[in-house]
Image (cartoon, rainbow, N blue to C red):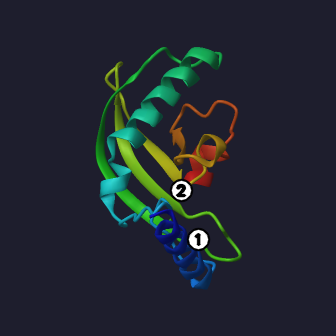
C-alpha cells in the first residue's frame, strides 16, 4: 500500500506543478465581494465604526462624550477594484448616524479589502462629520467622500 500512496502523491504533485501560478487552489481563501449596500451595512463594518468612534471620543480632547446609537440611510458611493497600478480594492460608503445626544450626523467610511491586522481581514476607515478634530481626513471628511 505504501508504494501506491507514494505514486499517488507523486502524481498529485506533478499535476499541481502544471497548474498556472495564479490559479487558486482548494486551500486558498477566495473572497467574493458583491458591490452594493450589503457590505456597507455588514454588522462587522458597522461594529468597527462604532468601536472606533467610542475610542476616538474617549481619547481626543474636546470631543463630546457621545456614542453611536444607530445607522440610517447606508449606501455605497463607489467601488475601486484592485488594478496593477492600485493593488488594494476599496469600497466607499456613506450613512447617517444617530448619536446618544439626539443629533444625526453624516458618516463616510472606506473598506480596504485584505488590509486588516497582518493582512488578515479588512480595514475600515471612517469619519463622522464634526468629529475629525485634527483634520486627519481633510476638511469635512473630504478624503473619505
Q: How many marks?
A: 2
2 and 1 marks in contact (CB < 8 Å): yes
Q: Badge 1: few (under 14), some or many (20 or more) residues near its Cα, within 10 Å?
A: few
Residue 141 percent across, percent down from the top left? 58, 46
* Residue at 48% in and 48% down: 108
What residue sits right under mark 1 in the picture? 82
Residue 126 on image: x %, y %: 53, 42
| Residue 58, numbered label | none
Percent position (x, y) of residue 6? 54, 68
Answer with left or right where residue 115 lies relative to residue 25.
right
Q: Is residue 123 above or below residue 68?
A: below
Who is closer to the viewer here, 8 or 96?
A: 8
Element at badge 1? Answer: loop
Q: Which mark is residue 113?
A: 2
- Secondary element at image label 2: loop
Q: Position of residue 60 (x, y in %)?
A: 64, 20
Q: Relative to residue 40, is residue 51 drawn left or right?
A: right
**Which residue is at a point 59% across and 80% down the rendered structure image?**
14
First in residue order: circle 2 vs circle 1: 1
Q: Is 86 left or right of 113, judged from the image as shown?
A: right
Q: Where is the N terminus found, in terms of image quarters?
A: bottom left
Mark 2 residue crowding within 10 angstroms, few (<14) / some (14–19) / many (20+)? many
Q: Residue at x 52, y 52 (%)?
A: 110
**Real-space CA distance between mark 2 and mark 1, rounded to the nearest whole angstrom:** 9 Å
Position of 26 relative to 47 (above/below): below
Q: Is residue 98 above or below residue 28?
A: above
Image quadrant in which you'd find residue 133 = top right
Amino acid at each position: 500500500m505504501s508504494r501506491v500512496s507514494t505514486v499517488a502523491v507523486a502524481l498529485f504533485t506533478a499535476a499541481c506543478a502544471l497548474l498556472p501560478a495564479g490559479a487558486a487552489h482548494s486551500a486558498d481563501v477566495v473572497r467574493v465581494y458583491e458591490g452594493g449596500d450589503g457590505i456597507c451595512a455588514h454588522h462587522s463594518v458597522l461594529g468597527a465604526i462604532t468601536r472606533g468612534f467610542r475610542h476616538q471620543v474617549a481619547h481626543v480632547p474636546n470631543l463630546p462624550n457621545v456614542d453611536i446609537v444607530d445607522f440610517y440611510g447606508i449606501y455605497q458611493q463607489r467601488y475601486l477594484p484592485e488594478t496593477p497600478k492600485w493593488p488594494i480594492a476599496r469600497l466607499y460608503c456613506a450613512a447617517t448616524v444617530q448619536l446618544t445626544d439626539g443629533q444625526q450626523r453624516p458618516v463616510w467610511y472606506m473598506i480596504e479589502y485584505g488590509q486588516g491586522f497582518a493582512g488578515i481581514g479588512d480595514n475600515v476607515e471612517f469619519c463622522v462629520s464634526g468629529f475629525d478634530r485634527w483634520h486627519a481626513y481633510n476638511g469635512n471628511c473630504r478624503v473619505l467622500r
